[in-house]
Image (cartoon, rainbow, N blue to C red):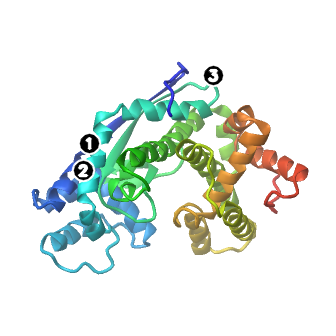
Amino acid sequence: PLSAQTNPNFDVALRIDYESAEKAIEFYGDGFENTEELSSLRGSRIAASTAGYIAQRGNATQILKDYLDSLKNREIIRDDVFHLEEARSRVGAMKALLQIIKRENFSRRVSATVEQIFPQDAKISASIPLYFVAFGSNKVDAFVQRLTWNGDEPHAVGEGQGELTIVVNLAHAVEYPGEMPVKYVTLLGVVAHEVFHAAFGVYKDGSPLWKMYLAKHNKPIDELLDITQNEGIAYYLSLDEAGRGRLPRDWIVRMQQAFETYNKNAAELAANGTSQLRVSELIRTANLSGYWESYGSMTGMYMAREIDQDLGRAALIETIRKGPQDFFRKYESLQERDSNLPKLTLWLE
């Protein structure tokens, strides 16, 4: 279902690193016993750090080796933020999926999917590291971060800093519905989602318009608006690619719930006096609460779909160029025309 690349300005390649996944799969099958080496690999460290953040355990890279040792010794692991037992039970499926990934032109097919959502004159050139791992949080199957490294210790950094890096957890990916070839196509959509984020980051870094916008919009509510557009378009891209236009049966109910949560949380983020701890929680849960519970991502996905289908692909691409304010204004124009659309109560500048 994925076309070849056609935009000569879009040059995004993936530097794929399989080592953490391969060694973990071997470890689960009792064929690799060096837990020090497995836990110290860069892919493993990123997965551990992110799992710790989502579970609110801080930097969990220090405990990964201990947990792997417990698994090797068949000991009970309490509060397993890495879900190692679950991963070990899926080792055969992970091995099969990894074989398909290596056999197909994975990087090229992903890039061809993503380029369609960017302006034709947007010059995006990037070589993005992609780490396949075989453990991690059960809330995310893949993610992208901006990272700097202190030796082999990863540190997440903000916009315009570090290296955009993608991580895919095969232990989560093998739980996608369908037979293995269907799981593979779903994974293509998921990775396209993450490559979109990475390419969007490169585009922002080189856009004078985005630099001016980000310099003026640095409040907590602005961070939510950015998440809504960025995650929303990415989720819509993967939904459209994997689902081929099909929507879940409970789509309307789910979206109404997402918008209700969004309006409530956006008002709290926009208010003066909201504590930093509460701000951090609202931003984290906007995108890292599980698929349907990530209120920012789901609201943005609905908005992106309506803009694309009602105003056209060119309108959605224009929001990439102009930013969150344009994304929200386009959806507000649709609200005014169609009273059945879920309502946003957030008013922009």
Q: Position of residue 121 (x, y in %)?
A: 63, 22
- Residue furthest top in the image: 8
Report the Cα–Cα distance between label 1 and label 2: 6 Å
Q: Position of residue 89 (x, y in %)?
A: 25, 66
Earlier sequence position, callout 3 versus callout 1: 1
Left or right: 331, with 105 as reference point: right
Residue drawn at 27 percent across, 67 percent down: 84
What label sits on residue 220 in the rendered view? none
In this orientation, which residue lies closer to the viewer: 319 or 274? 319
Report the Cα–Cα distance between label 2 and label 3: 40 Å
Toward which corner of the image does residue 210 lie, by quadrant?
Answer: top right
Q: Are marks 3 and 1 in contact (CB under 8 Å)?
A: no
Q: Amino acid at mark 3?
A: Asp
Q: Amino acid at mark 2?
A: Lys
Residue 218 visible in the current orientation: no
Location of mark 1 (residue): 99
Report the Cα–Cα distance between label 3 and label 1: 36 Å
